[in-house]
Image (tube, grey):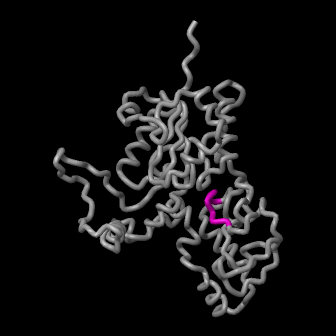
Amino acid sequence: MNASPKPKFGMYWAAACGGCDISVLNIHEKILDFDANFEVVFWPLVMDAKCQDVEAMQDGEILLTLFNGAIRNAENEHMARLLRRKSKILVAFGSCACEGSVPALANLSRIHDVFSTAFTTLTTDPSEHGLPAAQVHVAEGELQLPALYPTVRTLEQVVRVDYFIPGCPPESHQVEAFVNWVVAVVNGQASLPEAGETLGGGISTVCHECPRQRDVKTIRAFKRIQHVLLDPNICILEQGVLCSGPATRDGCHALCPKAGSPCIGCYGPAEGVIDFGARLMTAVASVIESQDPEEIERILDGIPDPAGAFYRFNLAGSLLRASKLAAKG
């Protein structure tokens, strides 16, 4: 009697840096549980698989797909819709898929300005090149490039997402816990959580996991971290260095603040937070030690790159999403 076929697994990399794929590989020998319990049918980073292979599958044939990366261009959207059809469970894996992350900061600029900055400013390539086009004629024929969209979108803004795993990238211990859970589900030892849940994250904030003392509230200026000798026992934000802990979902074990570095918000908004940037602005306002409007404005002017600081990981998933100029193309 033949053994039952193993369920199929896929992973895809859209507009992202590739760190999410590496975070899965970083679970070391635990990765062998995938091979023991799944048939890996599509994972471009680690195997030779083509889009046509996925297109030939039956709808819902893949049990689980981890989709990392935001939706920046036409190819990203095509693969998101294709993998949604072919997958029973589609997981937004990592900050870019969940919130848009750093690629979405381009939503503050027009697409023309993005191209112009990338292709007409100083370069190490001395040759002259024009702006890329969607169709290019080469000796072998016509080359088609994916059209770049005016704004970056999250995966959920394009297709239905079953679960979310935050992080830039998700921490290895969270990935390992997820692998253990999926294997248990496959073996009938666990059940699926309610659709739409965030896995690998808590329901509080990074501050809840951070051991530093809070409620000192002595901020008279904001400074860059390289200009401050931080007290290892006092809240980083309350020492005048912007820290995103008050607005960020816990689950990372506050690794950055424990190492003397501010939280940058990669686990996304804490449970119940509608807009990450607005929540962080509220936290910043609460620790400023001044009642003078002019002094408060001076203190806030010390925050470098406010848009990048408050929406580094969350712009596409925020209430703002994009500037008006960018949204118009």
Q: Is residue 263 visible?
A: yes
Q: Residue at x 35, y 69 (%)?
A: 124
Q: How many marks?
A: 0
Q: Is residue 156 visible?
A: no
Instruction: Tell whether position 127 is magenta.
Output: no
Q: Is residue 196 above or below residue 100?
A: above
Q: Quadrant of residue 63?
A: top right
Q: Is residue 242 left or right of residue 45?
A: right
- Who is closer to the viewer here, 50 or 93? 50
What range is drawn magenta here?
Answer: 263-269
Residue 174 position in % (x across, y down): 68, 46
Residue 135 position in % (x across, y down): 22, 53
Quarter of the picture containing the N terminus is: top right
Q: Is residue 304 above or below residue 182?
A: below
Q: Is residue 109 left or right of residue 190?
A: left
- Who is closer to the viewer here, 29 or 295? 29
The furthest residue to the top: 1
Quarter of the picture containing the C terminus is: bottom left
Q: Is residue 240 left or right of residue 62?
A: right
Q: Is residue 198 above or below residue 315?
A: above
Q: Residue at x 69, y 68 (%)?
A: 261
Q: Residue at x 45, y 40 (%)?
A: 44
Residue 307 position in % (x across, y down): 53, 73
* Secondary structure mostly taken by the magenta-highlighted segment of the chain: loop
Q: Is residue 4 left or right of residue 151?
A: right
Residue 16 position in % (x across, y down): 48, 54
- Who is closer to the viewer here, 118 or 312? 118
Instruction: Tell whether position 268 is magenta.
Output: yes
